[in-house]
Image (cartoon, rainbow, N blue to C red):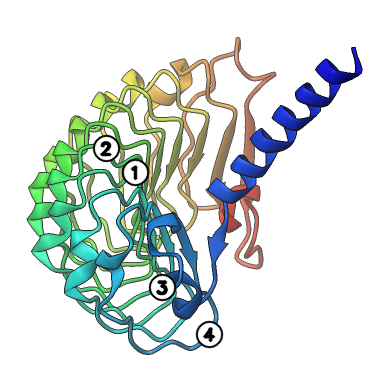
């Protein structure tokens, strides 16, 4: 009996050890280079790194690369040869361009490029068909390539604090999209068929120049949260009144509200935000 218990304990120890090893994160280039074949995750953040050494293709099993909060301005060619990469996190750097070769990272599921200096996104981004989360807020973007519509598995798209006046109609092809953050731009209109985003749950339009939201929004039957604060004199269509899932609506004193459906008043929370309110929505820091 003791023998069997010992074997069971040994097996549990081996499984635990293997899992811990598999999840090991390397925090320096030197350490990673000593264990090339074993490296699955590299995280070097907040170290004021200016340049990424052109060695990334020496880690054949690399799946996660997090170099956020540094001073990186360009990306090395070897990055685009990391065929198993699933997560690329580069927010808060000085990156001003992305190579068209980004399309070669076909296993990417998460791409974070917020807080950089990007002015364009290459059309080859449309090749990242496994991408679930794309964050490019706080850049200098004024256009999105129509190929954005090819990201059919995308669930989260963060475009806040850029220079967008319009969006390509192809964005409405993102049928799995749950979160769309367009706050702090210059949008004067939305695609007429915005309602084709049938799984949309969170729509943030605050600090834009919109005057209306297309009637097709009524097709977004899973919409839970809407933010239209500081969009000027915006009239919210009565199309919103029949969205049964809508729970939180953030407006300001200039917003012309929709007529609430009496059946949903008990579960809908309408928050009127004043000019003094800066952080008014729990999801603002996410």
Secondary structure of the residue carrying numbered label 2: loop
Please say if the residues under marks 3 and 4 sit with CB atoms less than 8 Å apart.
Answer: no
Q: CA distance from mark 4 to mark 1?
A: 25 Å
Q: Residue at x 45, y 65 (%)?
A: 35
Q: Which residue is mark 3?
A: 33
Q: Residues within 10 Å of mark 2 (few under 14, many from 20)?
A: some
Q: Is residue 199 above or below residue 121?
A: above
- Where, quadrant-wise, is the N terminus in this rendering? top right
**Residue at 46% of width from left, 65% of height from top?**
42
Is tag 4's residue or tag 1's residue first in the polypeptide sequence? 4
Give 73 or 219, whichever is nearer the viewer.
73
Residue 90 position (above or below residue 222): below
Sequence-wise, the earlier of marks 2 and 4 is: 4
The answer to whether one can see residue 144 in this image is no
Residue 236 coordinates in the image, percent (x, y): 40, 36
> Does the residue at mark 2 contact the one at mark 4 (Cβ under 8 Å)?
no
How crowded pointer 4 is (Cα within 10 Å; few <14, some 14-19, many 20+) is rated as few
Q: Are marks 1 and 2 in contact (CB under 8 Å)?
A: yes
Reading the image, the residue beneath label 2 is 130
Closer to viewer: mark 3 or mark 4? 3
> Quick check: 152 above or below 142?
above
What distance separates the C-alpha of mark 2 from that of mark 3? 28 Å
* Mark 1 nearby-residue class (10 Å; few <14, some 14–19, many ≥20): some
Residue position for label 1: 109
Reading the image, the residue beneath label 4 is 47
In primary-sequence order, the first of circles 2 and 3 is 3
Distance between the Cα atoms at labels 3 and 4? 18 Å
Residue 56 location, quadrant: bottom left
Mark 1 / mark 3, whichever is N-terminal: 3
Callout in the foreground (2, 3): 3
Residue 244 point in image, percent of width and height: 51, 15
């Amino acid at each position: 009996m003791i023998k069997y218990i010992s074997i069971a304990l040994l097996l549990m120890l081996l499984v635990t050890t293997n899992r811990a090893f598999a999840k090991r994160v390397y925090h320096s280039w030197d350490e990673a280079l000593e264990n090339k074949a074993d490296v699955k995750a590299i995280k070097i953040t907040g170290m004021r790194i200016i340049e990424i050494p052109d060695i990334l293709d020496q880690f054949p099993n690399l799946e996660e690369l997090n170099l956020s909060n540094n001073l990186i301005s360009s990306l090395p060619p070897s990055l685009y040869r990391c065929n198993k990469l699933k997560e690329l996190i580069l927010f808060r750097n000085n990156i001003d361009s992305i190579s068209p070769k980004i399309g070669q990272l076909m296993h990417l599921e998460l791409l974070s490029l917020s807080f950089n200096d990007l002015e364009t996104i290459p059309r080859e981004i449309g090749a990242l068909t496994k991408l679930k989360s794309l964050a490019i807020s706080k850049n200098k973007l004024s256009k999105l390539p129509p190929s954005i519509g090819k990201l059919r598995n995308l669930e989260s798209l963060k475009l806040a604090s850029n220079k967008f006046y319009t969006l390509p109609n192809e964005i409405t092809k993102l049928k799995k999209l749950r979160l769309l953050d367009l706050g702090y731009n210059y949008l004067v209109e939305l695609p007429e068929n915005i309602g084709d985003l049938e799984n949309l749950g969170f729509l943030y339009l605050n600090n834009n120049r919109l005057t209306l939201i297309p009637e097709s929004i009524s097709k977004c039957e899973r919409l839970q949260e809407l933010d239209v604060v500081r969009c000027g004199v915006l009239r919210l269509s009565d199309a919103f009144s029949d969205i049964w899932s809508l729970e939180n609506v953030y407006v300001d004193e200039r917003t012309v509200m929709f007529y609430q459906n009496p059946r949903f008043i008990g579960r809908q929370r309408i928050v009127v935000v004043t000019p003094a309110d800066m952080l008014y929505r729990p999801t603002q820091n996410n």
